[in-house]
Image: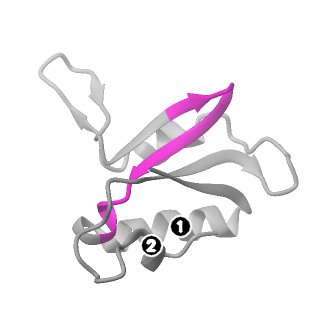
Amino acid sequence: MATIGSFLRMDNAKPLNRSVIIEGVTQDGRKFRPSDWAERMSGMLATFGRDHRMHYSPMLRPVSIDGVKCVVIDATMTESNPALFAQLMAFAKINNLKVVEKN
């Protein structure tokens, strides 16, 4: 699993334009349950619009990649909300979920 520091440039300037993806699959290949985990997690930064519908934040959103539920985290969260980023990474570690860094 990547560390928070690996998302920053060597000169500790602003984070690169990257995403961190928590996959809904454990390190040993089992599907993570409950099935709505990604939506629940993404709900932490979601808001309700005038249309009375939930709108996920671009910083934290659920996606499906090749049929696998995932959560995409904008790596700039390491600066804008480091406590939440650490909480998300701890969740992935505790549940033995795959974490991938994407450019």
Q: What whole-number distance in Å separates the C-alpha atoms at marks 2 and 1? A: 5 Å
Indicate the quadrant containing the N terminus: top left, top right, bottom left or bottom right.
bottom right
Tell me the chief SS of the magenta region: strand
23 or 19, which lies in front?
19
At 59% from the left and 35% from the top, the residue drawn is: 36
User: Left or right: where does residue 3 sit relative to residue 92?
Assistant: left
* Part of the protein shown in magenta: 63-78
- SS under mark 1: helix
At 30% from the left and 66% from the top, the residue drawn is: 15
Disc on res. 86: 2
Give the residue number, with chain letter if any, for mark 1. Answer: 89
- Residue 85 placement (x, y as % from top left): 40, 66
Q: Is 67 part of what is drawn in magenta?
A: yes
48 or 23, which lies in front?
23
- Residue 16 placement (x, y as % from top left): 32, 61
Residue positioned most to the bottom: 11
Q: Crowding near pointer 1: few (<14 within 10 Å), some, many (20+)?
A: many
